Image (spheres, helix red, strand yellow):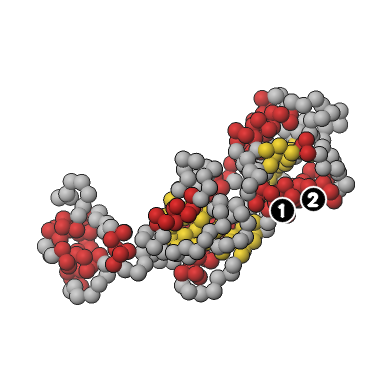
Amino acid sequence: MRPAGRVTITDVARAAGVSVATVSKVVNGRYGVAATTAERVQQVVTELGYESSLIASSLRRTHTNVIGILVAGFDPFATELLKGISANALGKGYELLAYSGAIADDNAVGWEQRSLSRLGGTLIDGAIILTPTVVLPSTTVPVVAVDPHTGTGGAHVVDADNADGARAATRHLIDLGHRRIAHIRGRTDLMSAILREKGYRQSLEEAGIAYDPALVLDGGYRAAWSVDAARELLTRPRPDRPTAIFAANDLSAFAVLQVAEELGLRVPQDVSVVGFDDIPEAARTTPRLTTVAQPLQEMGADAFTMLLALLDGRTAQAHVRRPASLVVRRSTAAPPTD
């Protein structure tokens, strides 16, 4: 009969008819136990659902075979990266521990340092940190950063070409005939947002369109802020209202679609909308969203490959930058003629 509550090593020993020391040897892979006994103990472990303490095991060994995936929050961006990491981790001998160190405050700075101090060297052998907010100092375990807020300094880094993706998005709108193109930018303290705004401005300059600061509003990569920005832009009088909006991420673009519908504006007949990231929801909006695709699952896989090399003591590429590509759907068209 399965014991009530958490199964202990004593429960396993009693059910298998062996000593606690024997169970300890079996679950920790140590020698000195007959094969038939080890098989019986493993069977009982499986039947009772016993799990040894990861912390206690790590104190006895030099590694845990666990990689920490540290995230500020489990948003669609992080979820796609996690899919790529987990797919690449199959059969590699490591387990993954997803840990959010800033779930209560998505603007928290330094959350990854606190998370590493809690987990590093005790629970995890290495870490992949998604969008860290600071340049990481020397750490107790190998670290790879994906899309770091501060750019490519510090840890090993995987990111996408944010500037080129933004140039492609803005150039697409220009090629359709738009000249009054607004930008709802991301958080101004993040390198990705800075590069996306830079790409937007570069495409305007290349097309001979004067940059108008009145057409650039803060969205902070947040839906709520972007709703306010979209409403401010789309309620302007007709000559001042933009005919197209390039949003710094898909969540901001979704906010534009929402506000346009509320105001009775048609997308793309009255206003064209482009996002950035190409999270799965972008293909399910009405109309389906034109956006810039970051290969998020591939970026996650790259990060795992990079970290695995560091854990194995091999030379790892310091920076992997994936291209960002425009995905044209139904939310963009030529500007209105009236």
> From this viewpoint, is residue 240 visible?
yes
x and y percentages locating residue 221 in the rendered image: 62, 41
x and y percentages locating residue 58 in the rendered image: 32, 64
Residue with the most extreme front position: 137
Q: Do the residues labelled 1 and 2 touch (CB within 8 Å)?
A: yes
x and y percentages locating residue 224 in the rendered image: 60, 33
x and y percentages locating residue 326 in the rendered image: 71, 50
- Numbered label tally: 2
Amino acid type, mark 1:
Ala
Q: Splitting the image into 4 quarters, where does residue 285 fall?
A: top right
Q: Quadrant of the C terminus?
A: top right
Q: In this view, does 191 lie above or below 120?
A: above
Q: Residue at x 26, y 59 (%)?
A: 52
Look at mark 1 in the image and give the residue it sits on.
163
Residue with the most extreme right position: 208
Q: Residue at x 63, y 47 (%)?
A: 189
Comes first in the chain, label 1 or label 2: 1
188 on left or right of 51: right
Amino acid type, mark 2:
Gln
Looking at the rendered structure, the secondary structure element under dot 2 is helix
Look at mark 2 in the image and give the residue it sits on.
202
Distance of mark 1 from mark 2, alpha carbons? 9 Å
Looking at the rendered structure, the secondary structure element under dot 1 is helix
272 on left or right of 109: right
Q: In this view, does 135 lie above or below 22?
A: above
Q: Which residue is drawn at 15% across and 63% down?
A: 20
Q: Residue 311 carries which label?
A: none
